[in-house]
Amino acid sequence: MRKRKKGKVFQTPIPYKKRERKSIYELPYEQEARTAALERAAREIYDKKLPGNTAEVGVYRGSFAQHINWWFFDKKLYLADTFEGFDQKDVLVEKKFHYSAGTQEWNDTSAEYVLSRMPNPQNCVIRKGWFPKVMEDVTDLFCFVSLDTDLYEPIYAGLTWFYPRLVRGGYIFVHDCCNAEYKGARQALLDFSQKHQVGYVILPDEHGTAVITK
């Protein structure tokens, strides 16, 4: 049996300028599993020269979106959020089925603040309002999508809207799938995956991120 060489990790060549930031693999694993997976997904997408743009639904203050915008430096990034907290239409569903209390506000943000954090703001397209209505006029295909809305309705709607528009080999990340505070996130994933026979794997980040590929 051949011995593996220690201290070396295969890296797909990045087909753009050398990054000045540290590789995500040099950061604390428990905190950065989702971001590490994003980096790997981006390398796969560029290595395969996949077409399509990127999106995040549930942006909040842009902490994860800035990583998407960094790695997908030359792709459009749709940022869909109310930027004012949960929409009450979605909260009503949470309470009806006892998925969550839906009381967290998440409103200490703004589209302007999020854009100020983006490394490539010229590529960002703000879609402020209730999803999926804010994306009704979009005809793009997508290679990477992040769904981080916490609640059942927008996650299920996000999967329903984006999966048919996902290119072959693309990825959808669904956050909070193991978060006991937001049980609707996991239920939306289960309902969609069972209805459409779509598989996924759960990342070991703090609240569990499901990775769907096509």
Image: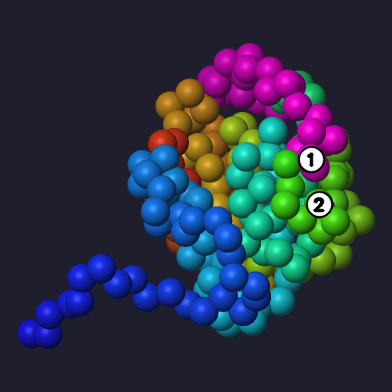
From the viewer's side, name the closer residue of 132 and 21: 21
Specify few, some or many for label 2: CA neighbours under 10 Å numbering under 14, 14-19, or 20 or more: some
Quadrant of the snapshot with the C terminus: bottom right
Which residues, given as a range, are shown in magenta? 89-116
In the image, 133: left or right of 189? right
- Going 56% across and 75% down the picture, which residue do you hit? 14
- Going 37% across and 75% down the picture, which residue do you hit? 10
From the viewer's side, name the closer residue of 19 and 64: 19
The amino acid type, in three-letter code, at marker 2 is: Pro
In the image, 57: left or right of 134? left
Quadrant of the snapshot with the N terminus: bottom left
Name the mark on residue 116.
1
Residue 114's place in the image compared with 142, above or below, is above
Q: Does label 1 or label 2 sit earlier along the sequence?
A: 1
Q: Position of residue 117 (x, y in %)?
A: 73, 41
Name the mark on residue 121.
2
In the image, 32: left or right of 50? left
Q: Position of residue 64 (x, y in %)?
A: 61, 44
- Residue sitting at the far left: 1
Residue 129's place in the image compared with 76, above or below, is above
- Residue sitting at the far bottom: 2
Q: CA distance from mark 1 to mark 2?
A: 7 Å
The amino acid type, in three-letter code, at marker 1 is: Ser
